[in-house]
Image (cartoon, helix red, strand yellow):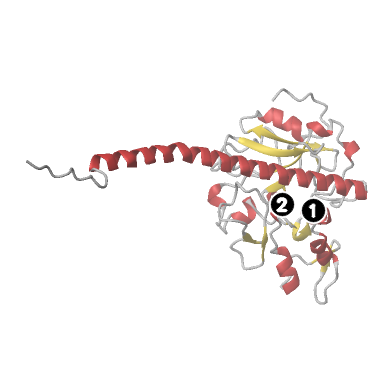
Amino acid sequence: MTFSPARRRIGFTLIELLVVIAIIAILIGLLLPAVQKVRDAAARTQCQNHLKQLGIAIHSYHDAYGTLPYARSGGGQNRHTWAVLILPFIEQGNMHSTWKTPISGVSVTDGYNNMVTTNATMTALRQTHVPIYYCPASRRGGPQLIDFDGTGTGTATASTSDYAVCRGDTSAIGPDGFGSGMIPFTAGNSTTPHMRGLRFMAVSDGLSNTLMIGEKHVPAAAFGDPAVQHIQDGIVWSGGEQGAFARLAGASNPLAFSETTTYGNQFGSYHGGGVVQFVFGDGGVRGLSNSLPGSTLAVLANRRDGLVVPSY
């Protein structure tokens, strides 16, 4: 009697294939959260680096001119802001020079070329995206151009930013209404003109206890909505919309709790974990929980209230 050799089985049974697929699905389920955490951590670190560089630029400006940059040169679309002033200190000296160099046919406001001119050179300049002004956790679609007046008749567009200076809490220092923050602004008068920056010595509560620049809150629904984005986000170069370049912090303007929080001229973040990052007056970058009491936030925002900062 002869026997034929057993044939070797090739391939998988259906059950084996399903088991392999299930194992792969489990592994993907375990890996995706880890990958997301790494991505979030990288974005947070890059954001911290941007804020650190902005803090160094502010200090360099103070070293060069003896004062901090002013928040804006005045209210109006053609008025420039701190973001223009510090360009030479963030390796953007050519941009600053172009803004300052007279161009035939272009008017000058507060020492800088017209912000909304149709001149090709100035149009390209104001539309330039400076990477340091953006947080990688925000604007998932990348940097955007925003119309100066939203859905109005004008069509001039320019770049924005994810950061704003802290103009203080809602209180004012002095009879002229000068804001209480490190980089405040006022309505402007002979006593306190718009183009007036403070000295570090004016921050009597201590540089390490005072907010300088932070992540600004822009509701997710505002991105790409021309009816509101020019106000709730705004153009960082221009003093036309206050929330574009400066924000309030305090009981009336607490940190935004989420990406959908209603706009209130406040600071907020797109980082996970409910942490909003700031660079303080001493140049240190620290994160504040979005559940921080508004009363504590106000103490940090005010440069000279004389109050002890509560533990946070």
Is 5 situated left or right of 126 in this image? left
In the rendered structure, find residue 132 and report the number of the disc placed on it.
2
Residue 195, position as x, y percentages in the image? 86, 52
- What amino acid is at disc 2? Ile
- Return the residue nearer the eye: 17 or 64: 17
* Residue sitting at x 71%, y 41%: 248
Whether residue 192 is visible: no
SS at mark 1? helix
The C terminus - image quarter: top right
Residue 311, position as x, y percentages in the image? 71, 22
Q: How many marks?
A: 2
- Quadrant for residue 229, please give it: bottom right
Whether residue 208 is visible: yes
Classify 226 as above or below 220: below
* Residue sitting at x 59%, y 43%: 270
- Return the residue nearer the eye: 219 or 53: 53
Residue 63, position as x, y percentages in the image? 91, 46
For disc 1, the marked residue is: 90
- Return the residue nearer the eye: 12 or 305: 12
Q: Are marks 2 and 1 in contact (CB under 8 Å)?
A: yes
Residue 253, position as x, y percentages in the image? 66, 37
Neighbours of disc 2 within 10 Å: few (<14), some (14-19), many (20+): some
* Residue sitting at x 86%, y 35%: 203
* Residue sitting at x 52%, y 38%: 34
- Quadrant for residue 250, please give it: top right
